[in-house]
Image: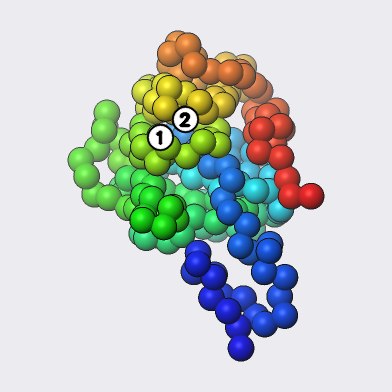
Amino acid sequence: MGRVLNNGTEVLAGTNFSKYEEELKYIVVIGTSTGGPKALKEVISSIPPDVKAAFLVVQHMPPGFTKSLAERLDYISKVRVKEAEDNEVIKNAHVYIAPGDFHLMVNKNADNVLRLKLSKDPPVNGHRPSVDVLMKSVSETKHKNVVGVVMTGMGRDGSEGVKMLKELNKAHIIAQDEKSSIVFGMPKEAILKGVVDVVASLNEIADEIMKIVGVHE
């Protein structure tokens, strides 16, 4: 007989349960737009498989494209990458991509389990999914270990979100630098909020994330 854990994971008898039952320690929220697929490939493919964090990603893309993006990233990465599904439990070493035309949010239930929520609420600043909507929902969970990352993209989506994450969660905020960004709009607007801790080149962002979240021993 197997065993179903509180987080919904089913494992076989005789398995070392401690690895599966380990609580979600860190949430890493990544927002990007123009130039994002290439940037995500660089960052996500560099994350080690035993990372004690979940990654929630908003990439501005139309419906249909986000699923293929998730599949491509999953193929080249050591962590599990998938398009986010409504009501699924957020797990360590997983990357969840917001589906095109859906806002991605996080809900905490009565047992303090964090689950994903998809919404067709109106676009925010012209975007659905919106980085700000995702970051706002993460901030409202009061989760204490959060990293916010804003990468290449046009506009200012994510700038209000990182401000909320810093104020409510004391989050560590990373922005991509101008030189390595295809479009510096989103990172620049985040930097102008005065809450960014590190401005990093694209090839440094994964290392900057890992400095904060670490890995399983």
Does residue 192 appear to the left or right of 16 in the view shown?
A: left
In terms of image quadrants, where is residue 47? top right
Vertically, is 164 above or below 42?
above
Kindly state the secondary structure of the residue where label 2 is placed.
helix
Q: Residues within 10 Å of mark 1 (few under 14, many from 20)?
A: many
Type of residue at label 1?
Answer: Ser
Vertically, is 188 above or below 4?
above
Q: Residue at x 53, y 75 (%)?
A: 4
Q: Residues within 10 Å of mark 2 (few under 14, many from 20)?
A: many
Compare residues 176 and 9 and report the one nearer the observer.
9
Query: Which disc is residue 65 wearing?
Result: none
Kindly state the secondary structure of the residue where label 1 is placed.
helix
Type of residue at label 2?
Answer: Asn
x and y percent of residue 10 in the render?
A: 56, 75
Q: Tell me, what colour scheme is on the image? A: rainbow
In terms of image quadrants, where is residue 3? bottom right
x and y percent of residue 26 in the render?
A: 57, 42
- For residue 99, say whether it is visible: no
Badge 2 is on which residue? 169
Of all residues shown, which one is farthest toward the bottom?
A: 1
x and y percent of residue 124 in the render?
A: 26, 33
Q: Residue at x 51, y 36 (%)?
A: 144
In terms of image quadrants, where is residue 182? top right
Count of numbered marks? 2
Badge 1 is on which residue? 139
- For residue 208, say whether it is visible: yes
- In primary-sequence order, the first of circles 1 and 2 is 1
Q: Residue at x 71, y 53 (%)?
A: 50
Vertically, is 213 above or below 76?
above
Q: Residue at x 65, y 80 (%)?
A: 12
Q: Are marks 1 and 2 in contact (CB under 8 Å)?
A: yes
x and y percent of residue 37 in the render?
A: 54, 41
